[in-house]
Image (tube, rainbow, N blue to C red):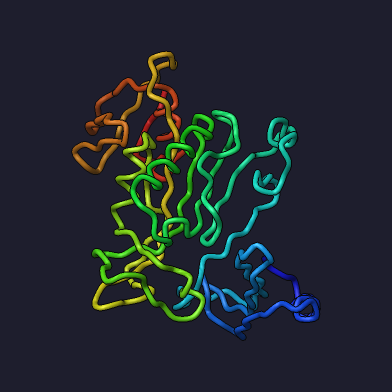
Amino acid sequence: MRLLDSAAMLATERRLVAAGASIQREEGVECCNSRQTKFWVHDPDGVLWEIYLLHEDIDHFGAGSEVVSVTPAGETSASKIDKSEVDEPESGSRLFWEHSLGTEIPTRLPFADGSLDEVRLNGTFNTALDEVTITSLLREVYRSLKEGGVVKLHTLVADRPVGGGELSLPGPASVVKATPMQDFLVRALRASQFTAVRFTKFKASPCFVVDEIQLRESMLEARKVLRGTGHEKRLVLYKGPMAEVRDGAGNIFACGEWVTVAAPVAETLRDGPNAEMFVVV
Protein backbone atom coordinates (compact mmCIF):
# COMPACT_ATOMS: atom_id res chain seq x y z
CA MET A 1 0.00 0.00 0.00
CA ARG A 2 1.51 3.30 -1.09
CA LEU A 3 1.01 6.44 0.99
CA LEU A 4 1.27 9.98 -0.36
CA ASP A 5 3.55 11.67 2.18
CA SER A 6 5.56 11.29 5.37
CA ALA A 7 2.74 12.63 7.54
CA ALA A 8 0.42 9.85 6.34
CA MET A 9 3.19 7.28 6.92
CA LEU A 10 3.81 8.40 10.52
CA ALA A 11 0.11 8.67 11.33
CA THR A 12 -0.50 5.14 10.04
CA GLU A 13 2.43 3.77 12.04
CA ARG A 14 1.21 5.44 15.24
CA ARG A 15 -2.32 4.08 14.88
CA LEU A 16 -1.05 0.55 14.33
CA VAL A 17 1.42 0.66 17.23
CA ALA A 18 -1.26 2.13 19.52
CA ALA A 19 -3.48 -0.80 18.59
CA GLY A 20 -0.78 -3.25 19.66
CA ALA A 21 0.65 -4.14 16.23
CA SER A 22 4.35 -4.95 15.81
CA ILE A 23 5.94 -3.32 12.77
CA GLN A 24 9.30 -3.54 10.98
CA ARG A 25 10.55 -0.34 9.31
CA GLU A 26 13.23 0.48 6.72
CA GLU A 27 14.36 3.98 5.70
CA GLY A 28 15.41 4.88 2.16
CA VAL A 29 15.57 1.28 0.92
CA GLU A 30 16.12 0.63 -2.81
CA CYS A 31 13.26 -1.51 -4.11
CA CYS A 32 11.81 -2.23 -7.57
CA ASN A 33 13.67 0.56 -9.42
CA SER A 34 12.84 3.15 -6.75
CA ARG A 35 13.93 4.46 -3.34
CA GLN A 36 11.30 4.01 -0.62
CA THR A 37 10.66 4.18 3.10
CA LYS A 38 8.43 1.33 4.19
CA PHE A 39 7.20 -0.81 7.02
CA TRP A 40 5.64 -4.26 7.33
CA VAL A 41 2.86 -5.45 9.60
CA HIS A 42 0.81 -8.65 9.94
CA ASP A 43 -2.96 -8.24 10.16
CA PRO A 44 -5.08 -10.38 12.54
CA ASP A 45 -5.41 -13.06 9.81
CA GLY A 46 -1.64 -13.36 9.52
CA VAL A 47 -1.42 -11.61 6.14
CA LEU A 48 1.76 -9.56 5.69
CA TRP A 49 1.15 -5.95 4.56
CA GLU A 50 3.78 -3.58 3.19
CA ILE A 51 3.08 0.15 3.49
CA TYR A 52 5.52 2.40 1.66
CA LEU A 53 6.35 5.95 0.66
CA LEU A 54 8.02 6.59 -2.73
CA HIS A 55 10.95 9.00 -2.66
CA GLU A 56 12.39 8.74 -6.20
CA ASP A 57 12.88 6.44 -9.18
CA ILE A 58 16.30 4.84 -9.70
CA ASP A 59 17.88 3.25 -12.79
CA HIS A 60 18.52 -0.18 -11.28
CA PHE A 61 16.62 -2.87 -9.39
CA GLY A 62 17.19 -2.57 -5.63
CA ALA A 63 18.70 -5.71 -4.09
CA GLY A 64 16.68 -7.46 -1.44
CA SER A 65 13.37 -5.95 -2.50
CA GLU A 66 9.95 -7.55 -2.47
CA VAL A 67 7.12 -7.47 -4.96
CA VAL A 68 4.76 -4.54 -4.38
CA SER A 69 1.23 -4.91 -5.79
CA VAL A 70 -0.41 -1.73 -7.06
CA THR A 71 -3.99 -1.51 -8.30
CA PRO A 72 -4.16 0.77 -11.37
CA ALA A 73 -6.96 3.31 -11.58
CA GLY A 74 -10.00 2.29 -13.58
CA GLU A 75 -9.90 -1.38 -12.62
CA THR A 76 -11.95 -3.39 -10.16
CA SER A 77 -10.25 -5.87 -7.87
CA ALA A 78 -12.42 -8.97 -7.63
CA SER A 79 -10.79 -9.82 -4.31
CA LYS A 80 -12.20 -6.63 -2.77
CA ILE A 81 -15.80 -6.64 -3.99
CA ASP A 82 -18.84 -8.69 -3.15
CA LYS A 83 -20.58 -11.32 -5.27
CA SER A 84 -23.08 -8.91 -6.81
CA GLU A 85 -20.27 -6.72 -8.10
CA VAL A 86 -18.53 -9.75 -9.63
CA ASP A 87 -21.69 -10.75 -11.48
CA GLU A 88 -22.42 -7.22 -12.70
CA PRO A 89 -19.25 -5.10 -12.87
CA GLU A 90 -19.54 -1.42 -13.66
CA SER A 91 -19.98 -0.63 -17.32
CA GLY A 92 -16.61 -0.23 -19.02
CA SER A 93 -14.62 -1.52 -16.04
CA ARG A 94 -12.07 -4.32 -16.27
CA LEU A 95 -12.43 -7.12 -13.76
CA PHE A 96 -9.30 -8.74 -12.35
CA TRP A 97 -8.26 -11.08 -9.53
CA GLU A 98 -4.94 -10.82 -7.74
CA HIS A 99 -3.06 -13.25 -5.51
CA SER A 100 0.04 -12.35 -3.51
CA LEU A 101 2.72 -14.32 -1.72
CA GLY A 102 1.65 -15.25 1.81
CA THR A 103 -2.08 -15.53 1.14
CA GLU A 104 -4.03 -18.76 0.78
CA ILE A 105 -4.49 -20.21 -2.70
CA PRO A 106 -8.16 -21.11 -3.25
CA THR A 107 -9.04 -24.54 -4.60
CA ARG A 108 -11.54 -22.90 -6.97
CA LEU A 109 -11.68 -19.26 -8.00
CA PRO A 110 -15.10 -17.74 -7.13
CA PHE A 111 -15.82 -16.54 -10.65
CA ALA A 112 -17.91 -17.73 -13.56
CA ASP A 113 -16.23 -19.19 -16.63
CA GLY A 114 -14.80 -16.49 -18.88
CA SER A 115 -15.57 -13.59 -16.51
CA LEU A 116 -12.16 -12.04 -15.73
CA ASP A 117 -10.11 -9.70 -17.90
CA GLU A 118 -6.86 -10.25 -16.01
CA VAL A 119 -5.28 -12.35 -13.27
CA ARG A 120 -2.13 -11.26 -11.41
CA LEU A 121 -0.03 -13.77 -9.49
CA ASN A 122 2.45 -11.76 -7.45
CA GLY A 123 5.00 -13.99 -5.76
CA THR A 124 2.51 -16.87 -5.83
CA PHE A 125 5.15 -19.32 -7.00
CA ASN A 126 7.75 -18.17 -4.46
CA THR A 127 6.26 -20.44 -1.85
CA ALA A 128 6.73 -24.21 -1.83
CA LEU A 129 3.99 -25.60 -4.10
CA ASP A 130 3.73 -29.06 -5.60
CA GLU A 131 3.05 -29.49 -9.32
CA VAL A 132 -0.53 -30.62 -8.69
CA THR A 133 -1.33 -27.33 -6.93
CA ILE A 134 0.38 -25.27 -9.63
CA THR A 135 -1.47 -27.10 -12.41
CA SER A 136 -4.81 -26.78 -10.60
CA LEU A 137 -4.34 -23.04 -10.04
CA LEU A 138 -3.37 -22.30 -13.65
CA ARG A 139 -6.34 -24.31 -14.93
CA GLU A 140 -8.63 -22.30 -12.67
CA VAL A 141 -7.09 -19.08 -13.97
CA TYR A 142 -7.60 -20.24 -17.56
CA ARG A 143 -11.24 -21.16 -16.85
CA SER A 144 -11.99 -17.82 -15.22
CA LEU A 145 -10.40 -15.61 -17.89
CA LYS A 146 -12.29 -14.23 -20.87
CA GLU A 147 -11.05 -15.10 -24.32
CA GLY A 148 -8.14 -12.76 -24.89
CA GLY A 149 -7.68 -12.33 -21.12
CA VAL A 150 -4.21 -12.12 -19.69
CA VAL A 151 -2.41 -13.70 -16.73
CA LYS A 152 0.66 -11.94 -15.28
CA LEU A 153 3.22 -13.67 -13.06
CA HIS A 154 5.70 -11.71 -10.92
CA THR A 155 8.23 -14.21 -9.58
CA LEU A 156 11.79 -14.55 -8.35
CA VAL A 157 13.24 -17.34 -10.51
CA ALA A 158 16.48 -19.35 -10.57
CA ASP A 159 18.78 -20.31 -13.43
CA ARG A 160 19.36 -23.75 -11.85
CA PRO A 161 17.51 -25.93 -9.33
CA VAL A 162 17.79 -24.72 -5.74
CA GLY A 163 18.10 -27.67 -3.39
CA GLY A 164 18.62 -28.13 0.32
CA GLY A 165 15.29 -26.98 1.72
CA GLU A 166 13.90 -23.45 2.07
CA LEU A 167 15.77 -20.34 0.99
CA SER A 168 17.11 -17.83 3.48
CA LEU A 169 17.26 -14.45 1.73
CA PRO A 170 17.95 -11.11 3.42
CA GLY A 171 15.52 -8.32 4.33
CA PRO A 172 12.02 -8.26 2.87
CA ALA A 173 12.97 -11.08 0.49
CA SER A 174 13.03 -13.41 3.50
CA VAL A 175 9.38 -14.22 2.72
CA VAL A 176 10.55 -16.00 -0.46
CA LYS A 177 10.80 -19.71 0.32
CA ALA A 178 11.07 -21.22 -3.18
CA THR A 179 12.32 -20.14 -6.60
CA PRO A 180 11.17 -22.08 -9.66
CA MET A 181 13.54 -22.40 -12.60
CA GLN A 182 13.10 -19.66 -15.19
CA ASP A 183 11.66 -22.02 -17.82
CA PHE A 184 9.37 -23.99 -15.49
CA LEU A 185 6.53 -21.46 -15.43
CA VAL A 186 6.74 -21.01 -19.21
CA ARG A 187 6.18 -24.74 -19.65
CA ALA A 188 3.45 -24.77 -16.99
CA LEU A 189 1.53 -21.97 -18.73
CA ARG A 190 1.76 -23.68 -22.11
CA ALA A 191 0.66 -26.99 -20.57
CA SER A 192 -2.40 -25.14 -19.22
CA GLN A 193 -3.32 -24.01 -22.79
CA PHE A 194 -2.09 -20.42 -22.50
CA THR A 195 -0.52 -18.87 -25.58
CA ALA A 196 1.59 -15.80 -26.42
CA VAL A 197 3.78 -16.56 -23.38
CA ARG A 198 6.52 -13.96 -22.97
CA PHE A 199 8.81 -12.38 -20.41
CA THR A 200 8.05 -8.68 -19.96
CA LYS A 201 10.91 -8.33 -17.47
CA PHE A 202 14.07 -10.44 -17.16
CA LYS A 203 17.37 -8.64 -16.59
CA ALA A 204 20.91 -9.85 -17.14
CA SER A 205 21.98 -8.97 -13.59
CA PRO A 206 20.64 -11.23 -10.83
CA CYS A 207 19.01 -9.85 -7.69
CA PHE A 208 20.70 -12.53 -5.55
CA VAL A 209 23.34 -15.22 -5.94
CA VAL A 210 22.98 -18.25 -3.64
CA ASP A 211 25.66 -20.96 -3.89
CA GLU A 212 26.45 -19.68 -7.41
CA ILE A 213 22.76 -19.98 -8.39
CA GLN A 214 21.49 -16.73 -9.89
CA LEU A 215 18.07 -15.49 -8.77
CA ARG A 216 16.32 -12.91 -10.94
CA GLU A 217 13.12 -10.93 -10.81
CA SER A 218 10.86 -12.00 -13.67
CA MET A 219 7.56 -10.80 -15.07
CA LEU A 220 5.81 -13.30 -17.29
CA GLU A 221 2.64 -12.78 -19.31
CA ALA A 222 0.36 -15.14 -21.24
CA ARG A 223 -3.05 -15.02 -22.88
CA LYS A 224 -6.11 -17.20 -23.17
CA VAL A 225 -6.80 -17.68 -26.87
CA LEU A 226 -9.28 -20.39 -27.78
CA ARG A 227 -8.36 -22.62 -30.70
CA GLY A 228 -11.84 -23.68 -31.74
CA THR A 229 -13.03 -23.81 -35.36
CA GLY A 230 -15.88 -21.32 -34.94
CA HIS A 231 -13.72 -18.20 -35.24
CA GLU A 232 -13.50 -15.88 -38.22
CA LYS A 233 -10.26 -16.40 -40.19
CA ARG A 234 -7.63 -13.75 -40.84
CA LEU A 235 -4.52 -13.55 -43.03
CA VAL A 236 -1.15 -12.87 -41.42
CA LEU A 237 2.22 -12.20 -43.08
CA TYR A 238 5.49 -12.32 -41.14
CA LYS A 239 7.96 -9.66 -42.34
CA GLY A 240 11.17 -11.05 -40.79
CA PRO A 241 14.06 -10.94 -39.94
CA MET A 242 14.02 -14.67 -39.05
CA ALA A 243 13.39 -17.27 -41.73
CA GLU A 244 10.30 -18.35 -39.81
CA VAL A 245 8.74 -18.11 -36.37
CA ARG A 246 6.21 -20.25 -34.52
CA ASP A 247 3.65 -19.07 -31.97
CA GLY A 248 2.50 -20.86 -28.83
CA ALA A 249 -0.49 -22.35 -30.67
CA GLY A 250 1.81 -24.11 -33.17
CA ASN A 251 1.21 -21.77 -36.13
CA ILE A 252 4.33 -21.40 -38.30
CA PHE A 253 4.92 -18.08 -40.06
CA ALA A 254 7.52 -18.20 -42.83
CA CYS A 255 8.92 -14.84 -43.85
CA GLY A 256 6.93 -13.29 -46.71
CA GLU A 257 4.17 -15.94 -46.81
CA TRP A 258 0.49 -15.40 -46.00
CA VAL A 259 -0.86 -17.71 -43.29
CA THR A 260 -4.54 -18.19 -42.39
CA VAL A 261 -5.22 -18.21 -38.65
CA ALA A 262 -8.18 -17.76 -36.30
CA ALA A 263 -9.07 -14.11 -35.64
CA PRO A 264 -8.04 -14.18 -31.93
CA VAL A 265 -4.56 -15.41 -32.92
CA ALA A 266 -4.23 -12.65 -35.51
CA GLU A 267 -5.38 -10.03 -33.00
CA THR A 268 -2.79 -11.22 -30.47
CA LEU A 269 -0.05 -10.73 -33.09
CA ARG A 270 -1.46 -7.39 -34.21
CA ASP A 271 -1.67 -6.00 -30.66
CA GLY A 272 1.43 -7.69 -29.19
CA PRO A 273 4.95 -6.41 -28.57
CA ASN A 274 6.16 -7.63 -32.00
CA ALA A 275 3.32 -6.11 -33.98
CA GLU A 276 5.72 -4.33 -36.33
CA MET A 277 6.89 -7.75 -37.60
CA PHE A 278 3.45 -8.79 -38.86
CA VAL A 279 0.85 -7.64 -41.36
CA VAL A 280 -2.73 -8.63 -40.47
CA VAL A 281 -5.60 -8.29 -42.94
Residue 189 locus on image (x, y percent): 36, 43
Q: Quadrant of the N terminus?
A: bottom right
Farthest residue in the top direction? 230
Q: Quadrant of the C terminus?
A: top left
Residue 135 locus on image (x, y percent): 38, 42
Indicate the quadrant where residue 53 lies.
Answer: bottom right
Farthest residue in the bottom direction? 27
Residue 196 locus on image (x, y percent): 38, 39
Position of residue 124 relative to residue 11, above or below, is above
Indicate the quadrant where residue 37 lies.
Answer: bottom right
In the image, taking residue 185 as reference, residue 223 lies left or right, namely right
Identify the residue at horizontal 75%, vertical 71% (top origin).
4
Name the residue nearer the viewer: 178 or 114. Answer: 178
Identify the residue at horizontal 42%, vertical 56% (top origin).
125
Indicate the quadrant where residue 214 lies.
Answer: bottom left
In the image, taking residue 84 as reference, residue 45 lies left or right, namely left
Position of residue 170 relative to residue 91, above or below, is below
In the image, taking residue 106 as reference, residue 44 lies left or right, namely right
Residue 30 locus on image (x, y percent): 53, 79
